[in-house]
Image (tube, grey):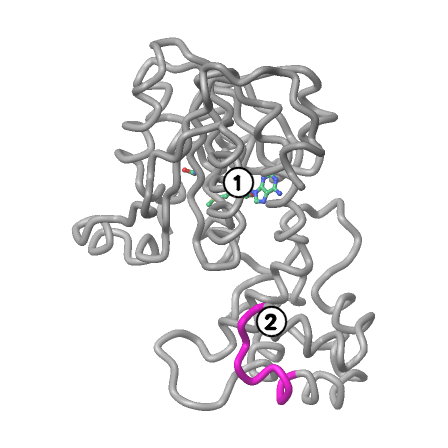
Amino acid sequence: MDEYHPSALLRETVEFFHRLPKGARILDATLGHGGHAKALLDAGFTITGLDLDAQALAKTEKRLPKLETILGKHSDLPALLGERKFDGVLADLGIRLDQLEGDGMSFHSTEPPDMRLDPTTTETAIDLLLRLDKEGIKRLFCEGGVRAASLLSSRVDKNRDRLERMDCQDLARLLSEPGTHKRHPATRAFMALRRAVNDEEGELCALLAALPLLLNRGGIAVLIAWHQNEDLPVKRSFKRWERMGIGTILTPKPLRPTPSEIKENPRSRSARLRAIEWSPATAYPIQHKEIHT
Ligand SMILES: C[S@@+](CC[C@H](N)C(=O)[O-])C[C@H]1O[C@@H](n2cnc3c(N)ncnc32)[C@H](O)[C@@H]1O
């Protein structure tokens, strides 16, 4: 695997921020290995990077010593940043390739299925499956777009006493959907589990709630989503803010990677970029409640 996560839609991301003056301060709320942050630093911006992954932060601090880094998650943003504001906010949602292929997450790993992005949280994927009843597991899979949600939840329920001894390979076999698939047959079920373990929906909601309070007037936000469940809340928030006169959507349709980017980085094919420009005239401070209801 490459040393650093391959960043998607890099050129397009930087282009949106070029609307800001040189030296403008940008928060990269999903710093990762800093691919986007490096391109933005090279373009003359000042970057603060946030990530919940302490190891990735340490690696990126070595790669980009000029960067200010903050360890934490989106739901901690108000506590971590207080009144601080930025001219731009970037979030490249989801997880890195090395996290996806890591010990507690990969279909091929012989480690226990942990799936936590933040090791300080308490519940692993197995803890979650053991805590939920059959209906709860079915709902989790349904919400994650798993077609065989009913079948898989029954299988989990019947194998409860084996769950704690399972490694990722065992769980991937248990959660494989029937039929032929281009990807691993347990892809949807693993993703649904990972999203639930890390409360990815709640974290995105927290980021969207914090955004209006983080951005200066005339600021730019760029969000990159990797699947429908991420893209829809972003699209809805942007539309609501535009209706309220808070911002102007810069991407009537989300930007997708070019065929040559997809050829070079096939995983980028799922990426969708949306950007919004904050109105120069918005009266601050706005209360969370006004923006997010
Ligand atoms: C797709 S990667 C970003 C990669 C980065 N743009 C780059 O070029 O290297 C998403 C990053 O967001 C982090 N992350 C995921 N959920 C988070 C959350 N709720 N709060 C903070 N960081 C999060 C992950 O640890 C991961 O490093």
Q: Is residue 170 visible?
A: yes
Q: Amino acid at mark 1?
A: Arg
**Residue placed at 67% from the left, 32% from the top?**
290
Closest to the observer, 176 or 147:
147
Closest to the observer, 271 or 238:
238
**Residue placed at 52% from the left, 36% from the top?**
30
Q: Which residues are magenta?
A: 144-152
Q: Secondary structure at mark 1?
A: helix
Q: Is residue 65 visible?
A: no
Q: Using the image, determine if residue 231 lies above or below residue 245.
A: below
**Residue placed at 78% from the left, 83% from the top?**
160
Question: What is the C-alpha distance between the residues marked 2 and 1?
Answer: 41 Å
Q: Would you name the residue on which mark 2 appears? A: 168
Q: Would you name the residue on which mark 1 appears? A: 240
**Residue 146 among magenta residues:** yes
Q: Secondary structure at mark 2?
A: helix
Q: Using the image, determine if residue 209 lies above or below residue 170.
A: above
* Mark seen at residue 4: none
Left or right, residue 5 beside residue 109:
left
Q: Position of residue 65 (x, y in %)?
A: 47, 18
Q: Using the image, determine if residue 205 lies above or below residue 27.
A: below
**Residue 215 among magenta residues:** no
Q: Is mark 1 within 8 Å of ligand 1?
A: no
**Residue placed at 36% from the left, 41% from the top?**
7
Q: Quick one: label 2, few (<14), some, or many (20+) residues within 10 Å?
A: many
Q: Position of residue 233 (x, y in %)?
A: 54, 50
Q: Amino acid at mark 2?
A: Cys
Q: Position of residue 20 (x, y in %)?
A: 36, 16
Closest to the observer, 202 or 129:
202
**Which is more N-terminal, label 1 or label 2?**
2
